[in-house]
Image: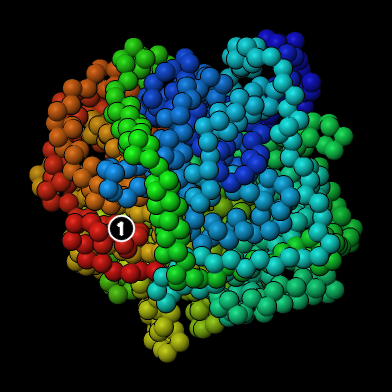
Amino acid sequence: MIHGFEKIRQQSIPELNSTAFVYRHAKTGGRVLSICNDDENKVFGISFRTPPEDSTGVAHILEHSVLCGSRKYPVKEPFVELLKGSLQTFLNAMTFPDKTCYPVASANTSDFYNLMDVYLDAVFYPNLTENTLRQEGWHYELEAPDKDMTYKGVVYNEMKGAYSSPDSLLYEHSQQSLFPDTTYGLDSGGDPATIPDLTWEKFSEFHRTHYHPSNAYAFFYGDDDPEKRLEKLGEYFDQFEPLDPSFSRVPLQPRFEEAVQVVKGYPASGKLAKGMFTVNWLLAPTNDANLNLALHVLEHILIGLPSSPLRKNLTESGLGEDLAGVGLEADMRQMFFSVGLKGMHPANAVKVESIIFHTIKDLVEKGIDPKDVDAAINSVEFGLRENNTGSYPRGLSLMFQSLSTWIYDEEDGTEGDPLRLLPFDEPLANIKRWVADGEKVFEELLARLFLHNPHRSTVLLKPEHKLGKEIEQKERARLDEAKKSMSPEQLDEVMELARELHRLQEAPDAPEDLARIPRLAVADLPRENQIVPTSETTVGTARCLHHDLTTNGIAYLDFGFDLTVLPDHLLPLAGLFGRMLTEMGTQDSDFVSMSQRIARTTGGIHSQVFISPVVNSDRAAARLFLRAKCTLEKGKETAAILTELLTRTKFNDRERFRQILFEAKSRAEQRLVPSGHMVVAMRLKARAHRAHAMEEAISGVTNLEYLRTLAQRVEKDFGGVLAELEQVRDLLLTRNGLVLNATMTDADFAVMEPLAASVASALPENPAEPMLFAAPELPLREGLTIPSQVNYVGKGCNVFAHGFEFSGPMLAASKFLRTSYLWEKVRVQGGAYGGFCTFDRTSGSFNFISYRDPNVEKTIEAYDGVAPFLKGLQIPEDELEKSVIGAVGELDAYMLPDAKGFSATARILAGETNEQRQTMRDQLLATKPEDFVALGEAAAMVAEHGAVTVLGNGPAMDVSNLDLEMREIW
């Protein structure tokens, strides 16, 4: 027994360089998985089984609400206070169909335990009130008895945004079609049409029963003291009496005897909307390690590469523009597989279904190409051993993986095993052995779980141009009926409750309550920037930036080609051209064999566009990188592949080019709703600097329109398109101006350097003069309409052009602005899911942007109020310190080795030196109150000179007084 916890199990996991300990809290039965290793990026998470009984979004709203103040930390938003003043490397909460998770991470031990304590107090002792439900969930809003009543609420508007995304709707309908009898047949996020049915009684009771140690799963990971973990956790678990958690068990879905068909509509506008279709199979429980890993390999075989047989047959059918469905979903009690096409005519659904089943039948009867099997196993194994989680902490990935078997009790009541899937060597060795012995592992799985499996569904999502208006009319009718049923006294009560909520939202937290939030002091922060080791050398004739970092034997090698040599009319081709290098095939290998070869040999090769303003210049650092990673023993073959891709890629396969183009166009269209804030930000920045305009031409609305035009040209003038592609190749893929980025140890670089030199030397010489991209004139006030129930509202300008100068304290001031005024005005009071600002310290682009916002004009008014807010600000010393700490945390963002190397090279290309960064840090650490007032000058420039871009609901823009130049883009 350690601090009230009984050790149930201890297991070494050599694959993860970790030792895992499983504990049970003796008093309540609360479960703990504690993983010990030398990773400084520590992770803690507390999770609860939260299967809902309806689609009111109770679990999701509660996830938001518990972070709105607690017993020990009675401030309005402890979560925001942590964002302000923490060195956190991850801080969030998320609702899944059957669980709710609260993870935090930090590389600083003191900070880590501070975060942990605030989160534990939040989940177990939140200050939940009816006003919390009104703010985060829903409430009636009524300005006057003779005005229309509306719904407001953060989650309500978040889910209106989700229901505006066809991809999100398709995923929900596909999942729900397979699980009609379990929690997976409901929407745990909340259906906007059902959220107003959630009552305070159901809301508070859900917390009382579900947020209890007996229903909890605590996770630890990293290099901190394992006993202190249990001590901190025990302080909370010990305060509860045991509770029977069986009520929250997730049952198995009974198997279908025959397939089902589902047809649904989604709100669409214009002539661009097309249908989406999936075939879905319920497969098997998640907890069989061999089967689980085998299905991940099978997913890669079927759809993991452009050349994978099922992906290839669907995209080559010409029936749609891109793959639909999520592939393998393995985070629930039973796994399912979903695949189909989007960008298709609904009448072709039967043909798409036929292609899917014929492909699977052929693979079962004729066998899977052994090269596809080898490629899939190598790719899955490389991913497991590299354990590259990008910007996510590695521990967080392991937490979610453990939960996928841990929270599901067996049919006999035995608790789930959190370590079932984490050790992967044995199941991987089993799969390799079975394949080597000639067993038809994947053909058998296809036959049993796909071809002869009656538990499947088809989901057709059709565009309905009147549906958006019908949804709005139903909401209006429901609100009108509710208002009609109210007496004058009840209407007064609705208005008073809304006013009370606004008063609470606007009331400042007591200084003594804010002081309770634990945090570091500025004196605890490192004074020096983290320097990524970088040495510059010449490899062949190319400039090479090498970063001597430990990468566990993996070589990361990037070839960067200068995009500024392209004339303006060819620049929008850059992103598409990069994909073509790896997906078109070469003069020696068709794209199928090349895709197999890349997957069998490397950890992946992909292209990436990098564009940044150059410091103190109107020029852009613009590169198309071809990025590769491999083990040293595969270095020679990887270099041969890179040489072939860069010198022998063929562009004259019209049909293959058309497939890549339509995929790119479809993905750009689908991004508009879930990533509308990024679209708006890119559009605003495009007015501030040539580099941002180039980025928008390659990745923004301008590029979407270019792709649509290109799709028409391909049908009529492929010869002209081909000539442009070849011109891009001749100008771009040369050794002139080539920059290499290499991240690996010195010893590994000694092996890879001559191989990189051989690739560079194979490129032709073709010196071309850099050009200055002529940024197009964009409207000063534009409304970009899409079929969405919410908006993304932005305003900004280049404040450098109006005399403003950047200094380090601006990082703290903008951090403060995001987590104070904008959070309060745009999110809490305005009901948007998010509101934030961005300040590009190189270009001077200063922008305000909202996310899933019910408002338009009101949000712009909030932006224009930033300047007087900052100019009149008398910031307490405590708030100033928190902002500095948070800004330093962003400056020192935790990165894995490959990201460190690439970021260091990106800064060098943009002309930013370590000395400049250190000066900025020194200024930041010396931030004074007047520096926050100074940012008000920049905000005043935005208010007076800023351009406005709104993406979203056309009628909402029409009723504003912003005089927007309206244009339908989807």
Q: Could you say which quadrant of the image residue 134 lies in?
A: top left
Q: Could you say which quadrant of the image residue 512 lies in?
A: top left
> Label 1 sits on what residue type?
Ala
Location of residue 687 with respect to 895 vertically, above or below? below
Q: Could you say which quadrant of the image residue 520 lies in?
A: top left
Q: Nearer the viewer, residue 15 or 57?
A: 57
> Residue 265: horizontal and vertical position, in percent?
54, 67
> Is 566 left or right of 616, judged from the image as shown?
right
Location of residue 203 with respect to 591 vertically, above or below? above
Q: Residues within 10 Å of mark 1 (few under 14, many from 20)?
A: some
At 71% from the left and 57% from the top, the residue drawn is: 178
The answer to whether one can see residue 850 in this image is: yes
> Residue 785: horizontal and vertical position, in percent?
33, 64
Q: Residue furthest left?
A: 803
> Is 583 left or right of 880, judged from the image as shown?
right
Label tally:
1
Location of residue 583 with respect to 95 vertically, above or below? below
The answer to whether one can see residue 640 in this image is: no
* Secondary element at image label 1: helix
| Residue behind mark 1 | 956
Q: Nearer the viewer, residue 397 or 73?
A: 73
* Quarter of the picture holding the N terminus: top right
> Residue 16: horizontal and vertical position, in percent?
68, 35
At 41% from the left and 70% from the top, the residue drawn is: 269
At 34% from the left and 53% from the top, the residue drawn is: 792
> Residue 252: horizontal and vertical position, in percent?
79, 45
Location of residue 480 with respect to 76 vertically, above or below? below
Q: How is the image coloured?
A: rainbow
Q: Nearer the viewer, residue 740 or 563?
A: 563
At 20% from the left and 45% from the top, the residue drawn is: 861
* Quarter of the picture holding the C terminus: bottom left
